[in-house]
Image (cartoon, rainbow, N blue to C red):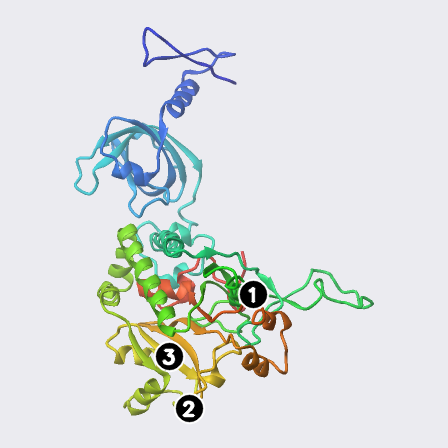
Amino acid sequence: MSFTLQWSAAFPSALFCRCSSRCSSKSFQRHCNRTLSEKVRVSDALSSKETGSNVRIQGWVRSVRPQKDNLFLHVNDGSSLQSLQVVASSHLNTRDLTFGCAVDITGTLEKSPSKRQNVELRARHIEVVGECNPVDFPFKIKERHSLEYVRQFPHLRCRTNAFSSLLRIRSEATTAIQSFFRDNGYVQIHTPVITSNDCEGAGELFQVEPAGHNDSDDPNPHFFSVPAYLTVSGQLHLEVMAGAFSAVYTFGPTFRAENSQSRRHLAEFYMVEAEIAFTESLDDLMKVMEGLFKAATEHVLSSCAEDVELFHKYIAPGHRDQVDLMLKRKFYVISYTEAIDILKSSSQNFTISTEWGCDLQTEHEKFLVKHCGNVPVFVINYPYELKPFYARDNQDQPNHTAAAVDLLVPGVGELCGGSLREERLELLSQRLSIVVIDRYLQLREFGSVPHGGFGMGFERYLQCILGLHNIKDVIPFARFSHSCLL
């Protein structure tokens, strides 16, 4: 059945139906309700200062409270933490109007008599688009579910207040990071997900091959000319681009085949990586790291105030003071040698002992942050043998170090890792004498300049500002060893 709506010059606000066949008044009324009502998001409706307008809301019911004469609903569409109260006549109530169901509601925005919200929607029509059985639905209307419980339902946890807030925060943090680099003149590079290099040298790689490809007679068994892997870092590709652009960055997924289900590990996570040409100082890198952290955090706090408050009030009480301290104070800088001296002189019993030349563990990193007053701290000039081949040799004695830096933050430990890159061809060739990467070495032959860069774990950043202990609670779909995939 089709409808034609005709405007009347005599009555400008009136619309008349000219149907191609007879229509029921209810069908026409429903059609008119949708046609004449402006579709708005819940967040826009809540912030609206104008009442009396006809609007259309689509979302999911967060609560249902039927009374003798009226029906009260709270509807949320994911645009804000706060839901919109809907008031309707009790005759609009139906059996399938339940907690969790999807609805399409038209009505009039009115000033609310309640102090909890400025406006409410007086409904004229309610349509249940998708039913939800509240008995089978794993989240209950009046229960506050723990993050551990919610984690069992990766396909449904976006329906909870905490996780929907997390996803809005994550979206705004992404915007803030992109804006920081754009405003500072960086060019975004889309580095490949499939690569042939192991940038970190740890060997924890996912190999990529076509499904069902098993031709034993093929002289080259690989789809590409060499074995291919999911990327662990975009750094080497950024170094290529740093030969033509003074500042570049990438922001995308990275993969580690670590056989771990701990609260610190993911098989797939997001990295923010930057590379800067014409720099010979770790100070330049540290300035960018600190600026990025503070700019992104200030944006999130101002743009997602309600969502952030949910975490700081109910999940990590008191953490806002910690975040404010990190924003207020300048980050500390200590050398690796100073860090080892601090750890050795402490009275704390560490699980792994510390000596010069050892790699710092999470327990060491967290202790160093506490020692510095719970302010983020840069640790610079690590032992040369601890760092990858591309880290610049400081050529110092007696302790041989590389120009590398890690940023340690409260509650997490290492957040960023970076270094100046070895631009001297002769030194780089010596270190790569066993496994020579021809194209990487060629970058040093044609217009090479001193450069450096760093990477920041995006999920760890979110853990740091929200006070969350499990990294699986800050990513939409957690991938880890032996986990089920959607």
Name the residue tied to disc 2.
Answer: 399
Q: Residue furthest top?
A: 10
Amino acid type at mark 3: Ile
Residue at image position (40%, 25%) is 34
| Number of numbered tags placed on the structure image | 3
Point out the frontmost of discs 1 and 3. 3
Q: Is residue 213 above or below residue 27?
A: below
Instruction: Decide which of 212, 436 is in the foreground and name it.
Output: 436
Q: Position of residue 363 (x, y in %)?
A: 36, 81
- Would residue 127 be seen by someone viewing this image from the given angle? yes
Q: Quadrant of residue 339?
A: bottom left
Helix, strand or loop at label 2? It is loop
Q: Position of residue 315 (x, y in %)?
A: 29, 62
Residue at image position (25%, 26%) is 52
Q: Going by the image, does 239 lie left or right of 406?
A: right
Q: Position of residue 346 (x, y in %)?
A: 28, 89
Q: Distance from label 3 to label 2 (Cα)?
A: 13 Å
**Residue density around tag 2, few if under 14, some if 14–19, many if 20 or more, within 10 Å:** some
Name the residue tied to disc 3.
Answer: 380
Q: Is residue 299 above or below residue 268?
A: above
Q: Earlier in the sequence, mark 1 or mark 3?
A: 1
Disc 2 + disc 1, Cβ < 8 Å: no
Name the residue tied to disc 1.
Answer: 231
Amino acid type at mark 2: Asn
**Residue density around tag 1, few if under 14, some if 14–19, many if 20 or more, within 10 Å:** many
Point out the frontmost of discs 2 and 1. 2
Q: Is residue 31 above or below residue 378?
A: above
Residue at image position (34%, 13%) is 14
Instruction: Decide which of 379, 256 is in the foreground and name it.
Output: 379
Residue at image position (42%, 79%) is 403
Q: Earlier in the sequence, mark 3 or mark 2?
A: 3
Q: Residue furthest bottom?
A: 398
